[in-house]
Amino acid sequence: MQHFLMHAWASFVGLMHSSSFITYAFGMNEGIWMHIIGGAILAKIIRTRFSYWQTVLIVLGIAILWEGIEIFIETPNWAAVLAIYGTKMRYFYDTAGDIIGATVIAMIANLDLKKK
C-alpha cells in the first residue's frame, strides 16, 4: 500500500510540473474563477462553525462532489466531453484546476493574519 501511495504521489507531482497541466488547468480554464469565488464564499460561511482544516476539507469535498455532478449536467457521455474539451486529459486537467482553485482559495480566505 505504501508503494502504491508513493507511486501515486510521484505521478501527481510529475503531473503538476507538466506545462500542459498548468496551461489547461489554470491558463485556459474559463470556469476556474467561478470555482475560486465559490470556494472563498463557502469557506467563509463554513468557517463560522468549523476549524480551519475542517473548513478546507469540507470545501475540498464539496468541490469534488460538484465536479462529479457537473460532468453529468454538462456532458452526458464521453463524446460530449470530447466535443467540449478535445481530449479526456484536457477534461481531467480542467477538473483538477477547478478543485485545486476552490481548495487553495479556501485555505487563503481563512488564514488568520492577525498578529498575536
Image: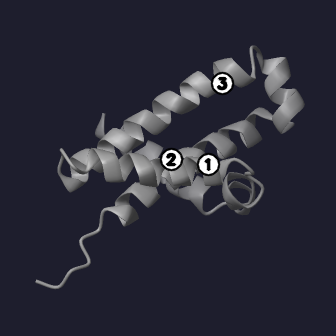
Q: Residues within 10 Å of mark 3 (few under 14, many from 20)?
A: some
Residue drawn at 46 percent across, 43 percent down = 8
To which residue does mark 1 refer? 34
To which residue does mark 2 refer? 38
Residue drawn at 45 percent across, 45 percent down = 7
> Can residue 5 be seen here?
yes
What x and y, as percent, mark residue 86?
A: 87, 36
Q: Is residue 3 above or below residue 52?
A: above
Q: Is residue 41 above or below residue 61?
A: below
Residue sitting nearer the eye, 7 or 35: 35
Q: Along the polypeptide, which appears first: circle 2 or circle 3?
A: 2
Separation of marks 2 and 3 at Cα, in angstroms? 18 Å
What is the quadrant of the N terminus in the image? top left
Which tag is nearer the camera, tag 1 or tag 3?
A: 1
- Residue furthest toward the bottom? 115
Which residue type carries mark 2? Gly
What x and y, as percent, mark residue 83?
A: 89, 29
To which residue does mark 3 refer? 71
| 29 left or right, relative to 56 | right
Which residue type carries mark 3? Ile
Residue drawn at 52 percent across, 30 percent down = 66
> Can residue 103 be seen here?
no
Q: Indicate the quadrant where residue 52 lies.
A: bottom left
Which residue type carries mark 1? Met
For the residue labelled by badge 1, is the local secondary structure a helix, a strand or a loop? helix
Q: Indicate the quadrant where residue 96 lies.
A: top right
Q: Indicate the quadrant where residue 23 lies.
A: bottom right
For the residue labelled by badge 3, is the local secondary structure a helix, a strand or a loop? helix
